[in-house]
Image (tube, rainbow, N blue to C red):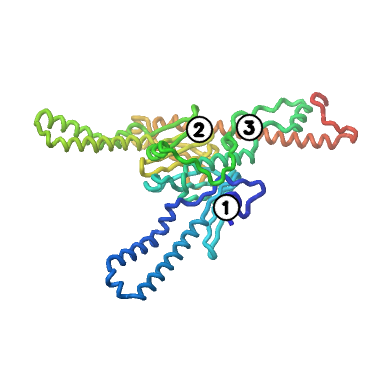
Amino acid sequence: MINVTRFSGQQDGEQVHLFLRRHPASLLWNLRYVILLFLAYVLALLLFSDLLASMGGMLAALSLGLAVALALATLWIYAVWYYDVYIVTDRRLLDFARKPLIYERRDEAQLNKVQDIRVDYPNPLALLLDFGNVRVQTAGSRGSIVCSMVPRPRQVQARILRLAAAAQQRSSPVGAEPPEAEQMRQYLGLSPSPSPGPAPASAPAVAPVPPNAGSLRPLTLRGYVHALLRPHLELRAQDRVWRKHWWVLMRATAISGSLFNVGIILGLVMLWKLGLVPWLVVPAAMVLVGGIWNLWNLLDWQNDLYVLTDDRIIDIEKVPFISEDRREARLQQIQDVHYVMPRFVNRALDFGDVEVETAGRDGGFTFKSVPHPRDVQAEIFQRVEQARRAASLADRQRQESDVLGVLYRYHQAAQAPSETTPPSSGGG
């Protein structure tokens, strides 16, 4: 039996951090035919009550049979929904699916192999009720695991990213040298171990993630309204953010801006020259529609964000009140970056598309119509190189520590039985 803290196949010391089922809206959607059939039967009883009353016992038997069938169908659909769960531990992401007595499946992915995570809100209802899909892309043969229609997918994505970073740190620890390696380094007269510097992209520094099975932070009213309009993004001073070029905004607001401006001019002409006050409702409607349309286009333009941090690349495409698509990947997954400025206007105004190829199976990232694409390409390459240098330095430090540890143990084993003390820090 699966619950929020224990499940079959759980490893020793493995802790559950998230226990997720699909949003209740998906359960209602799966029950739509049952609900429609029930409503149709009730409506038929109301509309044809006189005719159905003459059926007597037959109507009672039919009602009983229909009630039993609907109850069994409801119970089956609920059981399928109840046993379709996603579990996130400090080591793995697991996808359980079960149909009682018929079918059972379990997929899992190691968190230290996570490459990128994508969140999308497929429709306005999903954005309104805050549920969506979380696609976790891994380097394993399974490819990806999709957590479908889960509540608060942004928080799920953030939690998995933190747990994946912690798992990658555990698999490739960066820190102080073991005591035996440090002693052997001093014994051989080698220079002190270099500082590991900033954390590599494969293991960004993260705070410990306490186990909190199934818990997701509830949104405040302000946070809920903000999530409908704008994407949530936590930035640091060194992070870079790009939006699409202002030319894209000008094109998007061409019709709505024209409608707004024509409405103002037409209203002024009617008021001052013609005196057609009763007809002012027409330009007023044009100004209102054009203004709201302009504001919506502005928000849509502002919500398309391309972010580069010290360890991640983020692509956010959000349409206010309608949809949101957010994808994040580690810098070390980037394989190539190139840009294209396909038309004269792109060259004249210096904007274009920057295409980032990654190791993920879902393809790369495309920063569409960003200003100064040459500089964007150079910035991405620079941060990728910094991340790889930091990771390379950390790998060399780990390998050197391992070798020194082996030499230390060999030196102790090769000493005379009477020499049981480790080599001194300054001796030979």
Mark 2 or 3, nearer chain start = 2
Question: What residue is shown at x 62% (from left), y 38% (from top)?
Answer: 169
Residue assigned mark 1: 3
Residue assigned mark 3: 393
Mark 1 or 2, nearer chain start = 1
At label 2, counting other C-alpha atoms closer than 10 Å, the crowd grade (few under 14, some 14-19, many 20 or more) is some
Disc number placed over residue 171 in the picture, else none:
none
When asked about the image quadrant of residue 269, the answer is: top left
Residue assigned mark 2: 309
Report helix, strand or loop for mark 2: loop
Tell me the CA gap for discs 2 and 3: 20 Å
On the image, the x and y values in percent for residue 130 come to 43, 45
Residue 375 as seen in the image, left or right of residue 264: right
Query: Closer to the camera: disc 1 or disc 2?
Result: 1
Type of amino acid at the residue the image marks with label 1: Asn
Type of amino acid at the residue the image marks with label 2: Thr
- In this rendering, is residue 142 above or below 397? below
